[in-house]
Image: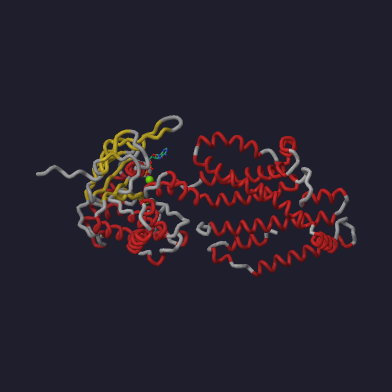
Amino acid sequence: MSGPAKTTRAGGGPPEGQGTDYSGLALNLVGLVAGIAIWWALTAGGAVGLPPPPQVAVRFADVIASGQLFTDIASSLARVLTGFLLGVILAIPVGFVMGWYKVARSLIEPYLQFFRMIPPLAIIPLAIVTMGINETPKIFVIFLASFLASVVATYQGVISVDKTMINAARVLGARDLTIFLRVIIPASTPFILVGVRIGLGSAWATLVAAELIAAQSGLGFRMQQAQLYYDLPTIFVSLITIGILGLAMDRILLVIERRLTVWQERV
Amino acid sequence: MASKPTPKIVFDHVTRRFDLSDNSFIALDRLSLDIADGEFVTVVGPSGCGKSTALNIAAGLLKPSEGTVLVDGKAVEGPGPERGMIFQQYALFPWLTVRQNVEFGLRIKGEEAARRRQIAERFIELVGLSDFADALPKTLSGGMKQRCAIARAYAVDPSILLMDEPFGALDALTRVQLQDQLLDTWSRERRTVMFITHDVDEAVYLANRVIVMAARPGRLKEIIDVPLPYPRTEEIRLSADFMTIRNRVWQAVYHQ
Ligand SMILES: Nc1ncnc2c1ncn2[C@@H]1O[C@H](COP(=O)(O)OP(=O)(O)O)[C@@H](O)[C@H]1O
Ligand SMILES: [Mg+2]
């Protein structure tokens, strides 16, 4: 599914040049149809043991009609967005403080590197024991994943701001606060946005694991339920929904990113 | 005769050391130099002889290890609006348009919007970028970027311009154009200019005096007067007098 991203990237250049690439889009569509056709062909005889597309489509219709899909989407989305937003909102100031003050960097960085090495899944037992089995541990795990991903990007953005640009601001009369607000923040925006996107990816990646913690609804929870009953179409429905939602959110962030960084020289 | 007027910039035994892991390294060794008000001096010397170090100390971006720099008789403590600076790599703010870049210093000064715009307009026109006032830096050529940086520096009305190889990254033709533009503005407004270059021709063409520096340790080697009249023209650039001075500077720089 990385087709559209690649075509716009390669087309790159000026922001006006980002207009929809119809031939690329047509090819994406062809690829999609071909993929479904292959899936159908492989599963039609029941040989692979996977459900063919019509069966999944019917299940989609069922869970849409019963409203179950929307309940699951709402629960999962609420968890992902809450964890993700909290993570990013905390990561940006922490990243700035780390980039701006050497002392803060030296104090915080060991923890950051350490926790980055622990997969979010491994935090779950601890989260359950200390936070119980309500929403808090699920959101916490997602929060941690997106926080760790974006904090590193933010602080790397801050430390890579061109020194000469800071000097230019200084000789024009800027003091620390002005330099921070008018130079450091805009100059590191591209890095921060990359971090935010990585953070979102991590948040989604952690979702299913988080919903292992005694959930009542959610796309990940639904999949585990389905697994118990060997209900493959429902597993497919959940997987496809998670993929589509993740992709849609990533695309939205990509558009925001491009809007906010049109000034960047892209090579 | 009355006492001599105070020089605009005084380097008084300015030394700068950099501490390396194993030892301390002298980048600038007891530089003493007076620059008169309204004077145009160029500084040439081999790479690493402390040109940028001296300029950054005058700008207030770097502290001397010993000695002081005086501007208008007062010791430099940090950057100040009376000292504008132009960098080789332009150092424009890429997220701001040409106009917003030029207004940056005015905004910090607290000028109100209408006045900011008016001042910016004037300097954008002066450097010939009126048609690009709302363009982002990424759409400009190197020469246009540097003209924008010059307008940005002029806008806060500094009495001193500190320029660190400002035209070093430009092609020969653009460079000559910008040299002439710079001299044109200078002869009207008489800012004091300290201009670093590694191009001997450029150094002679622009300056009242050429400061030649030597490396290891970075120090003043020789000061060469350029008694050629302004406006400097193509004719002067090709004259025998120019050649003579140029050769003297060349000797001073390369036969150390
Ligand atoms: N921040 C720094 N730390 C260590 N050494 C430096 C630093 N800045 C400059 N130097 C050294 O000081 C010397 C003079 O540098 P500089 O003033 O930039 O020379 P120039 O501009 O004449 O090429 C060089 O040898 C350079 O490597
Ligand atoms: Mg230099």
- Quarter that holds the N terminus of chain B: top left
Q: Is residue B31 left or right of residue A120?
A: left
Query: Ligand 1 sits in which quadrant?
Result: top left
**Which residue in the rendered view is the most extreme toward the left?**
B1
Q: Quadrant of residue A24?
A: bottom right
**Which residue in the rendered view is the most extreme toward the top?**
B22
**Measuring 26% from the left and 50% from the top, which residue is drawn there?**
B192
Query: Which of the pair B240/A75 is nearer the observer?
Result: A75
Measuring from the top left, give residue B25's x and y in whole percent.
39, 33
Measuring from the top left, give residue A214's x and y in whole percent.
79, 43
**Measuring 76% from the left and 46% from the top, which residue is drawn there?**
A211
- Quarter that holds the C terminus of chain B: top left
Measuring from the top left, give residue B251's x and y in whole percent.
28, 46
Q: How many marks?
A: 0
Measuring from the top left, give residue B57's x and y in whole percent.
34, 41
**Measuring 72% from the left and 48% from the top, which residue is drawn there?**
A207
- Residue B245 vs A127, above or below: the answer is below
Q: Is residue A10 left or right of residue B157?
A: right
Q: Is residue A31 visible?
A: yes
